[in-house]
Image (tube, helix red, strand yellow):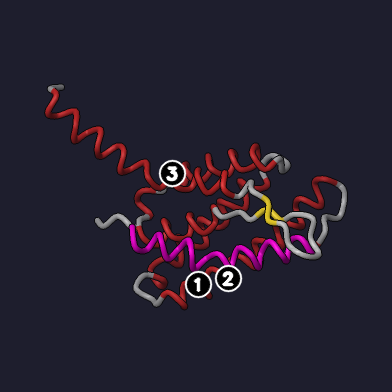
Amino acid sequence: MRRRDVIPYLADGLIRSIPFLTCFGFLFLGLFPFRLAFFAELFVPFIFIALFCWLILRPDLLPPMTVFILGVLADLIYANPLGVDTLIFMLFYVLVYTQRRFLVGHSFLFLWGTFAVFMLPLSGLLWGLVSLLRWQLMPIGAAVGQYCLLIGFYPLIAGLGRQTALKK
């Protein structure tokens, strides 16, 4: 390959890696605890917002294998039993990807509501699986607070993402 052929190739590779890199960044952002009244600390999985936005806007840049790898990384980073976050991420992927054609072109408020509806059973399933696999009942209040913070942060994160989304 000549030099003039390498630069567009590298630029295309960098552009194609942006969804993974942003999701990976939000995976680490979820490690920072929020201290609120009545809770010791809450960790918010911001990665779901990034996954939702990328799967709506550019699903071609976020294939299932990438979501699977992000799920395994989330299991390792969040210290959840191996496979829990991976299962939740893959269920989220299937849910959003299969409904994508109905979601494209809708208003921001509609997408926000859809995200809240999609995350409700998945948050409950995540809480249940972690409780089951750790053999102890995890605090339900923390799961509810985590869900509420995730839904509350959606406009900020998704609004920024919509403004800077890559166009095909």
Q: Secondary structure at mark 1?
A: helix
> Where is mark 3, residue-wise?
20
In the picture as drawn, the residue positioned furthest to the top comes out as 1
- Specify the quadrant of the image occupied by residue 140: bottom right
> Where is mark 1, residue-wise?
112
Tell me the quarter of the image containing the C terminus: bottom left
Residue 144 in magenta stretch: yes
| Most foreground residue, 62 or 166 | 166
Magenta region, main secondary structure: helix
* N-terminal label among 3 and 1: 3
In the image, taking residue 95 as reference, residue 108 lies left or right, namely: left
| Most foreground residue, 26 or 107 | 26
- Residue type pointed to by label 3: Phe
* N-terminal label among 2 and 3: 3
Question: Which percent across, then down, holds residue 68?
Answer: 53, 43
Question: Which percent across, then down, holds residue 80?
Answer: 71, 43
Q: Which residues are magenta?
A: 141-164
Tell me the quarter of the image containing the N terminus: top left
Dot 1 crowding, Cα within 10 Å, few <14, some 14–19, many 20+: some
Q: Secondary structure at mark 3?
A: helix
Q: Are marks 2 and 3 in contact (CB under 8 Å)?
A: no
- Residue type pointed to by label 1: Trp
Question: Which percent across, then down, holds residue 72?
Answer: 59, 39
In the image, taking residue 52 as reference, residue 126 lies left or right, namely: right
Q: CA distance from mark 1 to mark 2?
A: 6 Å
> Where is mark 2, residue-wise?
116
- Residue type pointed to by label 2: Ala
Task: Please tell me the numbered disc located at residue 28.
Answer: none
Q: CA distance from mark 2 to mark 3?
A: 23 Å
Q: What residue appears at the point 63 percent right and 46 percent down from the top-left corner?
A: 31
Question: How many callouts does the rendering have?
Answer: 3
Residue 70 in magenta stretch: no
